[in-house]
Image (spheres, rainbow, N blue to C red):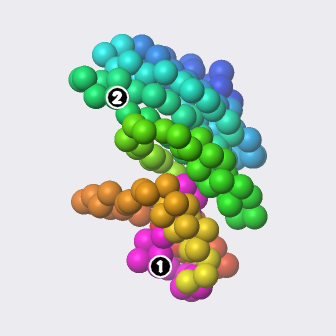
């Protein structure tokens, strides 16, 4: 989850949830970023690396071994491609299944957005290219898939 708060505050708030393990990344922008990953002792999880934008792990659960990366996407559009390249480099030589989840601060197409003007198709190229290069696909789900809302250019926008 994105925390938006300093680690000491996050720990104080999350301790009451009684998880056995917590990995934290402090926010790297004012009012944004920060990651908290919580898991129970039944899950064998090894943090391989972490940075401002993700926590990369190896997970062993119920006899299954896989990689899982928990992402807070780069908020600065100009820096997103660099983040995608860093994640791609992490996967080179990996043979295990890879689960990638959380907030990418990006969308694949205009169907993932409500409100405001439509984005140009060219604005989706970097994220789509990343997904394709890593052989990833978007798992569809039910319910409200619009997890972010805000004001952009005087328009209410949900993505």
Return the x and y of residue 79 as percentages of the image width and height.
74, 58
* Main SS, magenta residues: loop
Residue 45 visible from this viewpoint:
yes
Q: CA distance from mark 2 to mark 1?
A: 35 Å
Q: Who is closer to the viewer here, 116 or 64?
A: 64
Return the x and y of residue 23 as percentages of the image width and height.
55, 24
Q: Who is closer to the viewer here, 88 or 30?
A: 88
Q: Answer left or right for 94 relative to 120.
A: left
Query: Dot 1 surroundings within 10 Å: few (below 14), some, or many (20 or more)?
Result: some
Name the element at disc 2: strand
Residue drawn at x 40%, y 27% as measured from the top left: 59
Number of the label disc, if any, that sits on residue 85: none
Return the x and y of residue 142 as percentages of the image width and height.
24, 60
Residue identifier under label 2: 65
Residue drawn at x 45%, y 46% as measured from the top left: 100
Residue drawn at x 57%, y 34% as measured from the top left: 55
Residue drawn at x 52%, y 68% as measured from the top left: 128
Residue 13 visible from this viewpoint:
no
Number of the label disc, if any, that sits on residue 110: 1
Magenta run includes residue 105: yes
Q: Nearer the viewer, mark 2 or mark 1?
A: 2
Magenta run includes residue 151: no
Quadrant position of residue 98: top left
Return the x and y of residue 148 as percentages of the image width and height.
50, 60
Quadrant position of residue 104: bottom right
Is 67 situated above or below 107? above
Q: Earlier in the sequence, mark 2 or mark 1?
A: 2
Is 147 situated above or below 72? below
Name the element at disc 1: helix
Magenta range is 104-120
């Amino acid at each position: 989850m994105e925390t938006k708060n300093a680690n000491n505050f996050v720990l104080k708030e999350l301790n009451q949830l009684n998880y056995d393990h917590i990995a934290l990344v402090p926010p790297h922008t004012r009012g944004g970023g920060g990651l908290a990953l919580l898991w129970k002792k039944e899950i064998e999880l090894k943090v391989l690396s972490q940075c401002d934008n993700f926590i990369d792990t190896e997970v062993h659960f119920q006899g299954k071994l896989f990689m899982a990366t928990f992402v807070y996407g780069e908020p600065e559009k100009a820096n997103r491609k660099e983040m995608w390249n860093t994640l791609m480099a992490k996967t080179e030589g990996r043979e295990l299944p890879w689960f990638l989840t959380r907030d990418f601060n990006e969308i694949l197409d205009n169907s993932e957005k409500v409100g405001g003007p439509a984005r140009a198709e060219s604005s989706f190229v970097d994220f789509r290219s990343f997904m394709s290069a890593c052989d990833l696909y978007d798992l569809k789900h039910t319910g409200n898939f619009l997890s972010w809302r805000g004001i952009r250019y005087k328009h209410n926008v949900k993505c």
